[in-house]
Amino acid sequence: MLVRVMATSLAAGEYFGMRGKPLPIRIYMGLLKPKPDFVVGISFAGVVESVGGGVTEFRPGDEVYGECHGSCAEFAVADVGSIAPKPRNLTFEQAAAVPTSACTALQALRDHGKVRPGHKVLINGASGGVGTFAVQIAKALGAEVTGVCSTGNVEMVSARSAPTTSSTTRRKTSPKAARATT
């Protein structure tokens, strides 16, 4: 499917990849300079321009969001299995922030961590892209959530369902965080 990209978001890995750091990432991005056909970006939100034969789930004009390589472009080619209808209550910018970060958090907590009601979950980087979703998803799964973030983000993380929040600027783990995770 061809999608006109209305918004995209960059994860930390993409940001560092564009800078060529850490050095091993250059194997993928290009050793001395970016590969000529390499376009940065994975998560996007946009409007379907055209669909291929056999695609019945979407039509031109549909608002969608999802993942594909090269989303930092005016147009992107996406597989029908990698996109979904954009929720009407989200702007394109908000929807573009969801695919990679939210899916990473969901898979880590639900599929790999097997988080269930009553589990105690500590989320480091609770104010970052993945962490913000992880706090909310863990809470929705019924876990007792402790978020770790910088002092300036404690209020935001607490408001997002992590009533126990610890600041990374402290030298020792707070007793409250230690109790919450034991």
Image (cartoon, rainbow, N blue to C red):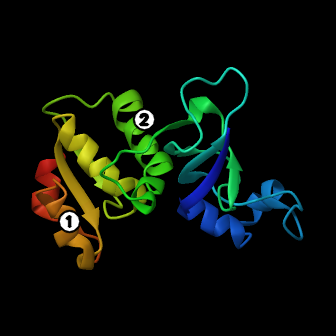
> Can you say whether 181 is above or below 119 in the image?
below
Tell which circle, 2 or 1, labels the residue nearer the N-terminal end. Answer: 2
Q: For the residue labelled by badge 1, is the local secondary structure a helix, a strand or a loop?
A: strand
Q: For the residue labelled by badge 2, is the local secondary structure a helix, a strand or a loop?
A: helix
Q: Residue at x 10, y 57 (%)?
A: 163
Q: Residue at x 38, y 63 (%)?
A: 128
- Quarter of the image for residue 175 reads bottom left
In the image, what residue type sits under mark 2?
Gln
* Residue 127 visible, this orientation: yes
**Residue 75 got which mark?**
none
In the image, what residue type sits under mark 1?
Ser
Residue at mark 2 = 107
Q: Residue at x 55, y 60 (%)?
A: 6
> Residue 113: horizontal and vertical position, in percent?
35, 32
**Residue 166 got which mark?**
1
Horizontal relation, residue 78 to residue 128: left or right = right
Nearer mark to the viewer, of 2 and 1: 2
